[in-house]
Amino acid sequence: MIASLLAILAILAIPAAIPRGELLWGGDLQGGEPYVFRDHRDPSRIVGFEVEIARSLARRLGVRERFVQNDWHHLLPSLERGDFDVALNGLEDTPRLRARALVTRPYCAFTEQLVVRKGSPFRRLDQLGGKRVGTLASSLAHEMLRKLPGVEVVLYEGQEEPYFDLVHGRLDAVLLDSVIAARYGVVKPELELADADVASGTYVAAVKDPALRDALDRALGAMEAEGELAAILKKWNLGEPPRPSMAPAAAEPQARFESGQLSLFARGAGITLFVSLFAMALAVPLGLMLALARLHGSTPSRWLAQAYVEAFRGTPVLLQLYLLYYGLAPLIHLSALSAAIFGLGLNYAAYEAEVHRAALLAVPAGQAEAAAALGLTRRQSLRLVLLPQALRTALPSMTNDLISLLKDSSLVSVITVVELTKQMTITAADVRSWALPGLLCAAMYFAMSYPLARLALRLEAKLGHHPEPAPKPAA
């Protein structure tokens, strides 16, 4: 009980808000160049044309700017729950966006471009009935493709992956913004531009506060009038959408996997360990309390404990994380790290409850009878006799569960926690390769889990063998 309370207090102590006097803007580093990405020369810095726009806006508002990493697909929910002030990361001006947030004046124009394999007969969207077309979820291209009859829409989280699948024949075409197509699509020798102007659109920033929207509009207007906005777009080759006759926009030198990336991986591994250990510190005592309630509690407590176990074991942990972080935001405003620890801890408590219950039932009934014969109360019997034996039996299973929790912690990236797996996807987008980042990520998970696996085996070997005492020689 004390350990559980200490874990809860430590979780609540994690800061949930950033001091004001700053313009907090949300984006996703996985989106890559030219939006927001890590400088390949110094991975501790973020660069991109939207980084420069955000800094100029903050300067004109008389405040500092601070970037908040957030999954691109969840920028709007995070904006709604107040994680940052402005969502500024390639948000396309669509009726769906305007229905959920206030939008600023546009700061960049683009066209939707259809990219196919070289020699493909498909040149227009209306020719793609029955074909597989890739795009990003929740994008303008996604909305357009959903309206086309017979098209199989394949959704991706990153912008490199659909073109990779197109090259390897897993897709028939990709429809994405010209900003993306020019840097990730037509630069591949196997691909070509089929239609450079399927539709037009603009990027806008999204906010909740009308006063902030008006202030940003004035700042953007000043940037445009003074030529600063045009200079930023020209620097990143975004002055106008690329046409088929034009060469692809010059991309930034491709980042390489160097020592700076290793330090980011180490930080991600540290967050993975932090979340896993604190979640387990919450799950073990809570699971023990649930097991005791099911075995020795009153009828209502038994029903409640069983309902808890079945509910958390019967629903996906990913769904539980979404509900805890986004669904309960109007009632409980947890930081992403706190929600990650609580979400995994509450989920694994249901499994620990079954481990402890099985261990308690494995204690011979004679132990409880002997304790009662000695005059011990039920609480004393549990504390002094039954629980010590049950915990010895449960230790190997608890260690195995910690290994599983270590790997399941990768799911918390959906609520903006940049743990090891999320860092791997960001780095893969930066260096445009999944092989080396993926292998390093797997190696780091193995390095963290293998000692625990060996510990579990040693515990099983040590605690699973109880030699019978040798018989006394006959007198």
Image (cartoon, rainbow, N blue to C red):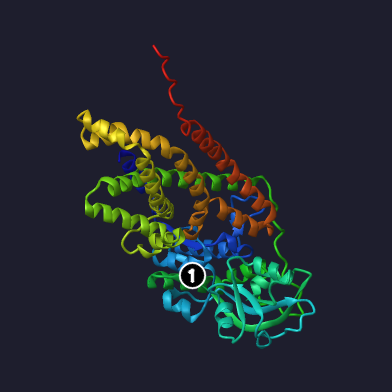
Please state the horizontal and vertical placement of residue 114, each as a whole percent of the image.
Answer: 68, 79
Q: Residue at image x 40%, y 67%?
A: 80
Q: Quadrant of residue 169?
A: bottom right
Residue nearest the observer in this picture, 77 or 349: 349
Q: Quadrant of the C terminus?
A: top left
Q: 227 left or right of 296?
A: right
Please state the horizontal and vertical placement of residue 200, each as a whole percent of the image.
Answer: 60, 82
Residue hosting label 1: 219
Q: Quadrant of residue 76?
A: bottom left
Q: Outermost residue toward the top? A: 475
Q: Residue at image x 66%, y 50%?
A: 439
Q: 15 left or right of 112?
A: left
The amino acid marked with disc number 1 is Ala
Please tell me whether residue 148 is drawn above or below residue 358 in the rendered image: below
Local packing at callout 1 (Cα closer than 10 Å; few below 14, some 14-19, many 20+) is some
Please state the horizontal and vertical placement of residue 313, each as a whole percent of the image.
Answer: 41, 57
**Count of labels shown?**
1
Q: Outermost residue toward the front? A: 475
